[in-house]
Amino acid sequence: MLDKKTNNKISDDNNKAKVCISAVGDNLSSALDPRFGRSSYFLIVNNSGKLIKAIKNTGVEAMRGAGISAAQIIAQEKCSVVITGNIGPNAFMVLNTAGIQVFQATFGMTAQQAFEQYKEGGLTEAKQAMPCQPGFGPGAGQGRGLGQGQVQGRGLGQGMGPGRSMSPGQGRGMGRGSGQGQGQGRGRGRR
């Protein structure tokens, strides 16, 4: 059987061809996860669409290198195809070097639907990385400064407050405060 889009031969041998689908859950009715490196699960299916295993992505919370780690897991599983929404350049390079084809599925479908579209030749093979748009945006910060005054002196304070943002970005606020104080003294004298 030939893939309509790529003219690549799709093996009918269920034991040889493994397909990895990025998903938010551990079964084929789960939604496709559009982020390869930060996908919650990798569903490994055979060429007829039967779920072989679901792998929980341990690198989902990594600060850096989540895509590379994910690609290495898939390469160790000996998958020949990855179906995902988006994939970063480093993960794409690892998969490409391992000879694994990457197909892009659209957001909003289940893992099962993505696999069926792949089998029908309805998915486009990625020839380069398709990174997600970063979730950074302008953040507005709030800060509050507190100053302390001393008798006939000046006080300066610095404060940092949690940032608030209307976008998925993060804000950081800083504030300065100054204060002046005057002292009043009461004293008792001796008689």
Image (tube, rainbow, N blue to C red):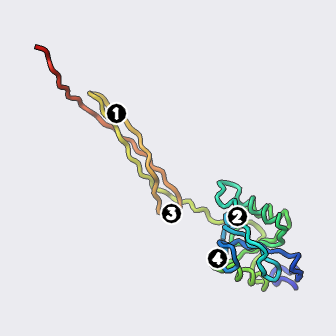
Q: Which mark is residue 107?
A: 4
Tell me residue 164's x, y (percent). 45, 57
Q: Is residue 103 left or right of residue 98?
A: left
Marks 4 and 1, Cα distance to the nearest angstrom? 56 Å
Q: Which of 93 and 189 lies nearest the eye of the viewer?
A: 189
Q: Earlier in the sequence, mark 1 or mark 3?
A: 1
Q: Earlier in the sequence, mark 2 or mark 3?
A: 2
Dot 2: element:
loop
Q: Which mark is residue 155?
A: 1
**Residue type, numbered disc 2:** Asn
Dot 1: element:
strand
Q: Earlier in the sequence, mark 2 or mark 4?
A: 2
Tell me residue 157's x, y (percent). 38, 38
Q: Which of 74 and 165 lies nearest the eye of the viewer?
A: 74
How busy is the neighbourhood of tag 2: few (under 14 within 10 Å), some, or many (20 plus)?
some
Tell us which disc is closer to us: 2 or 4.
2
Q: Is residue 172 left or right of residue 40?
A: left
Rendered residue at 71%/56% (across/down): 65
Contact (CB < 8 A) between labels 2 and 3? no
Tell me residue 92's x, y (percent). 77, 64
Q: Is residue 39 left or right of residue 49?
A: left
Contact (CB < 8 A) between labels 1 and 3? no
Contact (CB < 8 A) between labels 3 and 4? no
Q: Earlier in the sequence, mark 2 or mark 1?
A: 2
How busy is the neighbourhood of tag 4: few (under 14 within 10 Å), some, or many (20 plus)?
some
Rendered residue at 76%/72% (across/down): 53
Marks 2 and 1, Cα distance to the nearest angstrom? 52 Å
**Residue type, numbered disc 3:** Ser
Marks 2 and 3, Cα distance to the nearest angstrom? 26 Å
